[in-house]
């Protein structure tokens, strides 16, 4: 199992490394929302100049809130931001989508095939969860066509959430190959 490699590495890490003890409130009073993409691991923090203790990092597939979760802000991302803001002093939010995102242009046929291959019946799921059709399944997953549009939409959902106070929410897109940031939406 892959987890054994992690555990073996961790054994050495904890013997060789002494972490300084720091508080759980982010030093920069900032929450950063981004994608789960494996190419962002390490590169993301380096490109943004983020150190341990600086910010809250929230990751969701596609840095998005899927369509069914937007009404009523019934999203785990909104819940996490609320915790960050009310309990940990976050006062600014940055949403960072990225180029070549796996959730952009997700192929419904490939999704269905992958589910079936792993023993999940898409049709049964669609009926159980009242998703109507394959497109409903794709919407549940949060797939989108345009990363810039998605970032703007997520920024607006956060800005308009009744659970959250008015604070600056910005939208950026990071180039997955170069790490270069592009401003899509900037709060006043
Ligand atoms: Zn992505």
Image (cartoon, grey):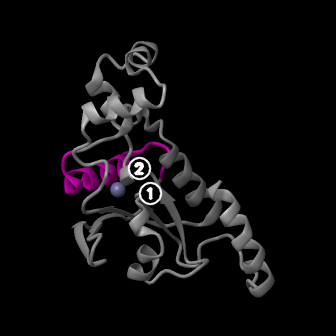
Q: Quadrant of residue 141?
A: top left
Q: Earlier in the sequence, mark 2 or mark 1?
A: 1
Instruction: Return the residue found at the far right.
Output: 15
For the record, the magenta segment spans 145-164
Q: Mark number for residue 61?
A: 2
| Towards the viewer: 114 or 149 | 114
Locate residue 95, reporting x and y percent.
36, 61
Asked whether 103 falls inside the magenta stretch, the response is: no
> Which residue position holds label 1?
36
Residue at x-position 24% and y-position 38%: 107
Contact, CB < 8 Å: mark 2 with mark 1?
Answer: yes
Query: Ligand 1 within 8 A of label 2's CB?
Result: yes
Query: Counting other residues with Cα less than 10 Å from the Cα at mark 2, is it few (<14), some (14-19), or many (20 or more)?
Result: some
Instruction: Determine the quadrant in which ligand 1 lies.
Output: bottom left
Query: Ligand 1 within 8 A of label 1's CB?
Result: yes
Residue at x-position 36% and y-position 20%: 131
Q: Quadrant of the C terminus?
A: bottom left
With respect to residue 170, does 181 lie above or below?
Answer: below
Query: Dot 2: what SS?
Result: helix
| Towards the viewer: 163 or 80 | 80
* For residue 22, side relative to residue 157 (left or right): right
């Amino acid at each position: 199992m892959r987890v054994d490699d992690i555990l073996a590495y961790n054994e050495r890490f904890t013997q060789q490394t002494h972490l300084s003890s720091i508080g759980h409130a982010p030093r920069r009073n900032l929450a950063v929302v981004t994608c789960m993409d494996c190419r962002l691991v390490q590169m993301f923090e380096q490109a943004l100049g983020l150190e341990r203790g600086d910010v809250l990092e929230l990751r969701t597939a596609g840095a998005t809130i899927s369509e069914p979760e937007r009404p009523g802000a019934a999203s785990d991302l909104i819940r996490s931001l609320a915790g960050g803001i009310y309990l940990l002093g976050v006062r600014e939010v940055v949403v960072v989508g990225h180029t070549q995102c796996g959730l952009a242009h997700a192929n419904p046929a490939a999704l269905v095939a992958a589910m079936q291959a792993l023993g999940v019946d898409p049709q049964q799921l669609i009926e159980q969860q009242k998703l109507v059709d394959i497109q409903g399944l794709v919407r549940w997953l949060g797939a989108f066509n345009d990363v810039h549009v998605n970032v703007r939409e997520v920024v607006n959902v956060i800005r308009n959430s009744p659970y959250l106070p008015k604070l600056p929410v910005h939208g950026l897109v990071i180039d997955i190959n170069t790490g270069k940031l592009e401003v899509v939406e900037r709060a006043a």
